[in-house]
């Protein structure tokens, strides 16, 4: 049962564990590519954030505004399911407080150091300095059976085969030395160039992730995942087999999520499982190459709510993005990686630069 083998750690235990235990946990994370950090945030604090966000959406008439902007976000058009209840909101107080918190700073430093960040090119990134990446919210209502997200990988589709930086990332696979491939080797990963498109991440992330705002688990319309860190090796090589046309990469399309389908990847999808039950304040982290999606049906009884917050350590690529993102933050516009829906320009309660903590100013690129 792949689900039972997912790595689950109490936040305080992960950081304070003896070296032997930390090494064992690191080895399991590198094998599975996903980890749940329990009790990252105090549950009462997170419940307050959840209530605040529900009110933020309601008092600013988000749904009325959404009707005017339908069709702007096309990133998931090629996936079999409809788009889940993801909100194009980036600058609410709870999102910014969580992103710039000491709790997440500590967690991300620990997680970043599971990577091999010193390569033949020098230091690929600084594991101890985080760059803030503004992502969205999910508020999925109970009973919803129309919305979901099929298995996919973010952060580049056809680029993984044709872009020079990605070719270096997967150099061992493409040269036939499969055993030498290490998904946690950061060499060349900060040099990749994605095809510009709304919702294609142009930052380097060591982990995608989210913070649970509500209790959720199997059947609650939440995260499904293939907990195999090196599954991308199979995806890359599958597209190069003789039964795939020379002008096809197993259905990969530019400027879209990389689709993982039963047609080409059925063996991998045998390991596609829901995450275990998580509580408010738990955080979930997965390697950027890990296959994931969202359940089609929400058969639970409560909202399935999360804030998408990953890890993007400081590097030249990420620092360049901060300069663009900072302007969007100051204007209340959508994060530059996403469709320019710009809901929050005049939202009541939007977080503004003067509210940043000293740590938040560094993470947003305002300097020390």
Image (tube, rainbow, N blue to C red):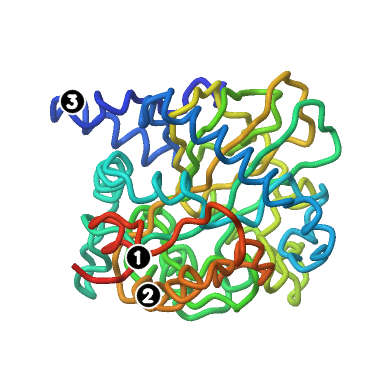
Q: Give SS at disc 2.
A: helix
Q: Looking at the image, is mark 1 or mark 3 nearer the viewer?
A: 1
Residue found farthest to the left: 19
Badge 1, how many Cα within 10 Å: few under 14, some, many 20+? Answer: many
Residue 303 sits in quarter: top right
How far is disc 1 from disc 2 in space, using C-alphas?
A: 14 Å
Residue 15 sits in quarter: top left
First along the sequence among labels 3 and 2? 3
How far is disc 3 from disc 2 in space, using C-alphas?
A: 33 Å
Residue 17 shows which numbered tag? 3
Q: Is residue 306 above or below residue 127?
A: above
- The residue tagged 2 is 317
- The residue tagged 1 is 364
How far is disc 1 from disc 3 in space, using C-alphas?
A: 31 Å
Q: In this view, does 146 lie above or below 248?
A: above
First along the sequence among labels 1 and 3? 3
Q: Which residue appears at 23% of the width and 71% of the height?
A: 367
Horizontal and vertical percent position of residue 254 = 69, 74
Horizontal and vertical percent position of residue 271 = 62, 33
């Amino acid at each position: 049962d792949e689900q039972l083998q997912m790595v689950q750690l109490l936040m305080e235990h992960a950081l304070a564990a003896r070296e032997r235990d930390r090494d064992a946990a690191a080895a399991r994370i590198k094998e599975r590519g996903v980890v749940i950090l329990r009790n990252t945030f105090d549950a009462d604090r997170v419940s307050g954030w959840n209530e605040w966000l529900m009110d933020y959406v309601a008092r600013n008439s988000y749904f009325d505004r959404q009707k005017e902007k339908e069709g702007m976000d096309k990133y998931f058009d090629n996936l079999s399911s409809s788009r889940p209840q993801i909100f194009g909101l980036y600058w609410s107080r709870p999102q910014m407080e969580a992103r710039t918190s000491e709790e997440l700073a500590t967690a991300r430093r620990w997680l970043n150091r599971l990577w091999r960040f010193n390569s033949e090119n020098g230091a690929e990134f600084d594991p101890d300095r985080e760059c803030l990446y503004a992502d969205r919210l999910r508020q999925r209502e109970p009973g919803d059976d129309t919305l979901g997200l099929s298995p996919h990988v973010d952060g580049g589709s056809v680029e993984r085969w044709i872009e020079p930086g990605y070719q270096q990332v997967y150099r061992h696979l493409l040269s036939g030395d499969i055993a030498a491939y290490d998904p946690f080797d950061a060499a060349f990963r900060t040099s990749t160039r994605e095809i510009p498109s709304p919702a294609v991440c142009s930052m380097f992330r060591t982990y995608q992730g989210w913070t649970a705002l509500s209790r959720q688990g199997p059947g609650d319309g939440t995260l499904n995942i293939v907990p195999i860190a090196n599954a991308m090796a199979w995806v890359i090589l599958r597209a190069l087999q003789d039964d795939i046309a020379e002008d096809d990469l197993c259905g990969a399309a530019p400027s879209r999520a990389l689709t993982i389908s039963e047609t080409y990847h059925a063996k991998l999808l045998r390991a596609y499982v829901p995450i275990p039950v998580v509580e408010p304040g738990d955080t979930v982290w997965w390697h950027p190459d890990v296959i994931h999606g969202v359940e089609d049906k929400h058969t639970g009884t409560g909202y399935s709510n999360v804030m998408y917050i990953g890890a993007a350590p400081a590097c030249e690529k990420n620092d360049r993005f901060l300069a663009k993102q900072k302007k969007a933050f100051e204007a209340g516009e959508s994060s530059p990686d996403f469709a320019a829906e710009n809901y929050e320009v005049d939202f009541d309660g939007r977080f503004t630069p003067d509210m940043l903590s000293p740590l938040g100013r560094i993470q947003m690129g305002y300097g020390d």
